[in-house]
Amino acid sequence: MQPVSLTAQWTAAIRAMETERPQDALFQDGLARHLAEPVGFTLLDRHRGGGVKEFVIIRTRYFDDAILAAVDAGIRQVVLIAAGMDARAFRLDWPQNTRIFELDHAALLKEKARRLDAAQASPKAARVPVPVDLTLDWTQALLDAGFDRTQPTLWLVEGLLFFLTQAQVQKVLDTCRSLSAPRSRMVVDMISASLLRSPFSQPFLASLRREQVPWQFGTDEPEAFLANLGWTVLDLKEPGMEGAGGPRWPYQLAPRNVPGIARSWLLTAELSRQ
C-alpha cells in the first residue's frame, strides 16, 4: 500500500486501544484490532505525543454522533472519502435502505476486504467499495458504482485533508459539492495553519515527513474556507469542548480569539443554499 494508506492502520490501532479501555470508552469498534495489525501499532509507538491519539479518539466519537444526526434527518446515502480502515458500515446501526460508498486506493480496499473476510465481518448496510485516486477526478467512478446525485448525501472526510495540498483539498471538497443534492451534509476534520507553523509541532511533523506522509494543509478560518467552497458550517468544535471529548482532552483549551494557537477543528456543514 502507499505510505499514506498505512496511516489508516495507525488510526485503527488507536480505535482498538479505545475499544479495549476498561471503562468509559467513547465508542466500540470490535474490528479495529483486525484492521490495525501489525503496522498500526508500530506507527502508534513511533509517533507518540502531541495529542494525536486523543484527537483521533475524540474525532471518531464526533463523527459517530454527526452521522447519527444526519441519518435521523433522513439522509440514506453516505460517502466515506479516504475510508481507510474505517468500520462504521459494520459497527453502527444504520437505517434500512442506507447505502455506504467507501472511496480509497485499490490496494488498501483489497487488503481491507481480506481482513474483513478473515474476521467474518458482515456490514449493517449496503456497502460499496470504490477504488479511486482522490488526487484525480473520481466523479465518474462514484457514479458508476451506483451513487445517486439526486439524493441528499452525507460526506465523511476524516483524517485526509491535512495530507493534501490546498489545491487538492479544494478539488475534493468542490467535487463533493458538485455531486450534492439539497440537504446534503459534510462532516470533516482540519488542522489550523498555526499548527503547521508552531515550534511545538515540528518534531511530530518532521517524523511524518520521514514516513513520507507530510501534513501540508491547514486553515485558521475553517468556516470561511468551507463557505468559499459552497458549504455552510452548522457546528464547529475543538477537542476539549462539550460534545468533543470534554475532559478526555488533556490540554487546556485556548479561547478562539487568541492568535497563533495550534488547533484541530471538527466540523459539520450543510450544502449552501443557492
Image (spheres, helix red, strand yellow):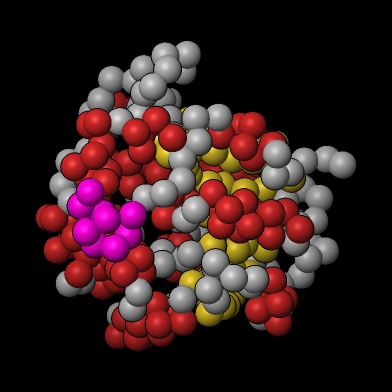
Residue that lies at the very extreme toward the right in this rendered image: 274
Q: Quadrant of the C terminus?
A: top right
Q: 261 or 269, which is in the foreground?
A: 261
Residue 196, above or below 247: below
Which residues lie in the magenta part? 206-214
- x%, y% of residue 64? 47, 49
Please report the residue visible at 54 percent of the width from the left and 62 percent of the height from the top: 81
Q: 49 or 163, which is in the foreground?
A: 163
Residue 191, above or below 72: above
- x%, y% of residue 106? 46, 82
- Which quadrant of the view contains residue 267? top right
The reply to whether residue 84 is visible in this rendering is yes
Q: 145 or 162, which is in the foreground?
A: 162
- x%, y% of residue 216? 41, 49
Residue 232, above or below 4: above
Taking 10 as reference, is 223 left or right?
Answer: right
Question: What is the number of callouts on the image?
Answer: 0
Q: 87 or 260, which is in the foreground?
A: 260
- x%, y% of residue 202? 24, 39
Please report the residue visible at 39 percent of the width from the left and 22 percent of the height from the top: 260
Taking 17 as reference, is 139 left or right?
Answer: right
Q: Quadrant of the N terminus?
A: bottom left
- Which quadrant of the view contains residue 118? bottom left
Please report the residue visible at 12 percent of the width from the left and 55 percent of the height from the top: 45
Please report the residue visible at 49 percent of the width from the left and 72 percent of the height from the top: 104
The reply to whether residue 239 is visible in this rendering is no
Q: Is residue 219 magenta?
A: no
Residue 125, above or below 166: below
Taking 156 as reference, is 218 left or right?
Answer: left
